[in-house]
Image: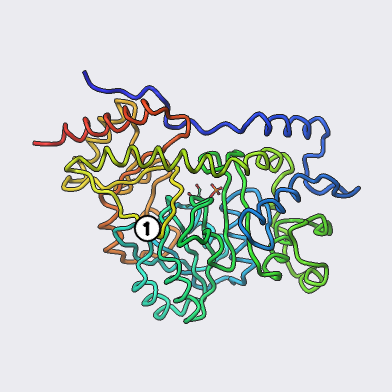
Amino acid sequence: MRAKLEFDLATPEAPPATSVQAALKLLKSGFLFRYAEMGSEGNEAALLEQEFATLLARKYCIAVNSGGSAIFLALKAAGVQPGDKVLLNAFTLAPVPGAIEHLNAEAVLVEINQRLVIDIDDLRKKAESSGAKYLLMSHMRGHVADMEAVSALCENIGIKMIEDCAHTMGATWNGVQTGNFGIAGAFSSQSYKQFNTGEGGLIVTDDEDLAARAILMSGSYMLYAQHSAAPPEAVFARWKGTCANHSMRMSALVAAILRPQLPLLPTRNARWRWLHDRIAARLKTHQLVRLPERPPEEDYTPTSLQFFMEGLSQSQIEAVIADSTRHGVPIKFFGGDVPTGFTSRAPHWAYIAPQPLPRSETVLATLCDIRLPLGLSETDADTLAQVVIESLNEALP
Ligand SMILES: Cc1ncc(COP(=O)(O)O)c(C=O)c1O
């Protein structure tokens, strides 16, 4: 009798009762827009910004309406102009090159390695050949590169780094949290991230000009003084009137749902890590499975699990996935001809110039991905691993 997982892997983590209470209170008040003209007393979004800046050990925080908006605004506030080149690691999600396209800038894709992170030699090469002055470093699926080496390279060659931390809320490299290496870090609170508000984004930075510009561009009208994790008036005075309003604010309602989740981060991440490592330990015993290496410097916060199906053709991998999906485990695949679900890769992004990425294409050709909802019990986790192992066994001669 084959194993079958009954738990739906698309189940997001519901916000806690304290989020529901805060949301109801705000709904009853009617003050859902973050900028009240009568003042900012008890403003949920401003309080969130203060608390998130403290969590990330950064001076400034700007709450916006999505992770993609956070990346767009961070890049724009950092000075990216139409036509500028922006380096980007080739393993990422579509909204990331999408943010570069939104700026009418040009994505220069950098190869990744077998660890699923940016290839530093290719980064150096592409930085020199393209003359790019920005790096959008996407910590895709929570895999963190050697950030000391990346930061040192950026400093040496005068590149401003913006980190996409959508999958690394709370992750560290050598004890330093992601979002602290670049001039700005962008986070998401879309439902499948560490915090669930449906939609939401946050920018953190220590750069006062970047912070002021991002606040003005997010759509603060003349009410920017209602931001509490923000630079002083004199900095805004330098930029007022020169920054377009892109209306990407976070609503007070989203902030109210998010704030009570902040203290849950360590518990949630510990549970995610436990689920990931338990399932990974079982999968790696299979001869067709290889896990990406995780160096000791990386303290990862996995909301999903990645593995390579080794030694199988694309159609064999697709057959394994179809079989495991029938048994309740919809594995995602980065090597498919067409993008599915949340997986896509450079050849699917027809809006950016085609670029040869032979090494990344080889890595992604066998890369599989499983979402790990926090609601999975220990038994569910073991069943999930068993389903994948049994589906893989079907592919053995
Ligand atoms: C790696 C990565 N970066 C950025 C984003 C954008 O976040 P959002 O969906 O909040 O716009 C996502 C979304 O899932 C993502 O996976």
Residue name at image x 75 percent, y 29 percent: 24
Would residue 295 appear left or right of 86 to someone viewing this image?
left
Would residue 74 appear left or right of 154 to someone viewing this image?
right
Q: Which one is nearer the viewer's eye here, 322 or 41? A: 41
Residue farthest left in this picture: 397
Residue farthest right in this picture: 38
Amino acid on which disc 1 is placed:
Pro
Q: In which quarter of the image is the C terminus?
A: top left
Residue 316: quarter of image: top left
Residue name at image x 42 percent, y 58 percent: 144
Residue 299 vs 314, above or below: the answer is below
The residue pinned by badge 1 equals 296
Secondary structure found at label 1: loop
Q: Which one is nearer the viewer's eye here, 276 or 158? A: 276
Residue name at image x 16 percent, y 48 percent: 311
Residue name at image x 68 percent, y 58 percent: 61
Q: Locate residue 95, reporting x and y percent.
A: 50, 53
Q: Locate residue 326, reporting x and y percent.
A: 29, 26
Residue 325 vs 49, above or below: the answer is above
Q: Locate residue 32, reporting x and y percent.
A: 77, 39
Residue farthest top in this picture: 1
